[in-house]
Amino acid sequence: MDSVKSPQPQKGRVSQSWCVSSVRHVLKNRRYQGQIIWNTKRKVRVPGTGRRIYRRRPESEWVVTSAPHLQIVSDELFAAVERRFAITQKLWGVGLAHGQQKQVYLFSGLLECGDCGGSITLVGGRAKTSRSEYGCSLHAQRGDSVCRNGLRIQRQQLGDRLLSGLQDKVLREEFVEYVICGLQEELRQRHENLEAGLESLRDEKRRIEVELKRLVDTIAVGNSSATVMAAINEREARLREITNQVIEPGPESLQEKLEELRTFAVLRLTRLRELLTNPAAIHEARALLADQIGKFKLERVNENGRISFKANGNIDFFGEEVLTRVGGAGGPVRTVRPYSFSLSLAA
């Protein structure tokens, strides 16, 4: 398809270029064989949402109309393409039979190209074997015009080296201590800032309490009015607001907060280490990796004259919910230093 203009890219796509799905649509288009097919799909409503989606109809319900004037490829060539698709499905496990399960790999969906930001996926080799290869999907599908990262790494090698790197260099308790140090400094600074304004808040609280007593006494002698009630509600609301701020813990509780965080992080880290060594828990392990690390960015590096991948990432030992709870009335902790790591995937 040299010099053939590609379809317009969808909104948000990298660039206008040919990709696997576009080529597949062309190769499967029965119009080029001289056939027009109707009634291949039907609309159904999703229970609970009312949203309508398309479902494929069985081939027995299709309506096929001959249109020889549209034919641009021979029946033999079209059949040869269909046979090639069947071979590809057999090799790569596409279109699995009912009851079969798709092969799931620990790091699939969690790898990102350091050159273009696209996904690192299985792009070569034989499926279900250790020799299948990971590489940039955009380079594999669209070429150097979109991404120049043509480096590949065998699936088994990437999995083994990334897993051992995580266990040996990332999932360690001393790195939890590194992050705790940053939290300790923020919590202490937060307490000092709050303590400086607490005295004025206490003075305001005492003044509002006197005003409230005076307003309540006014109602007690029969001088109730909408204005008096509004004044009482206003002062009560402000009093609750001040009380929430004044109850902020003192320095003696800072260590308790840090110990709570440390205990939580170590338990979370230990759980992830256990799951990564249990092949039966691959789905739960992938979910925790996605939650705590997100994406591994694979960048090309030159190590001793050889180009190889290096995996970069950041690990979150705590999670937003825990940091919000520990932050107390002052709000969530903001300046947590994430632990950044870099793991060589070279042999």
Image: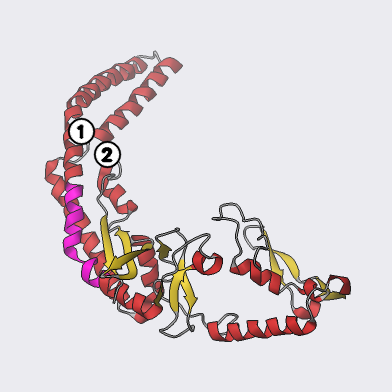
Vertical order, 131 against 222 (above or below): below
The tag on residue 76 is none
Task: Characterize the magenta stretch by its predominant secondary structure.
Answer: helix
The quadrant of the picture occupied by the C terminus is bottom left
To which residue does mark 1 refer? Answer: 194
Question: What kind of element bears circle 1?
Answer: helix
- Sequence order check, earlier mark of 2 and 1: 1
The residue type indicated by label 2 comes to: Gly
User: Of 250 and 124, which appears nearest the observer?
Assistant: 124
Up the image or down, 346 lies above or below 296; here it is below
Magenta part of the chain: 166-184
Image quadrant holding the N terminus, namely bottom right
Residue 245, percent from left and from top: 26, 34
Q: Position of residue 322 (x, y in %)?
A: 30, 53
Apparent side of residue 230 relative to residue 57 in the rendered image (left or right)? left
Circle count: 2
Q: Which amino acid does label 1 sit on?
A: Leu
Name the residue tied to disc 2.
Answer: 330
Q: Can residue 308 be seen? A: yes
Q: Circles 2 and 1: CB distance less than 8 Å?
A: yes
Badge 1 local density, few (<14 within 10 Å), some, or many (20+)? Answer: some
The image quadrant that residue 10 belongs to is bottom right
What crowding class fits label 2: few (fewer than 14 Cα within 10 Å), some (14-19), or many (20 or more)? some
In the image: residue 166, left or right of residue 299: left
**SS at mark 2?**
helix
Query: Is 5 part of what is drawn in magenta?
Result: no
Give the percent coordinates (x, y) of residue 205: 24, 25
Name above or below for residue 156 compared with residue 264.
below
Residue 8 vs residue 118: left or right? Answer: right
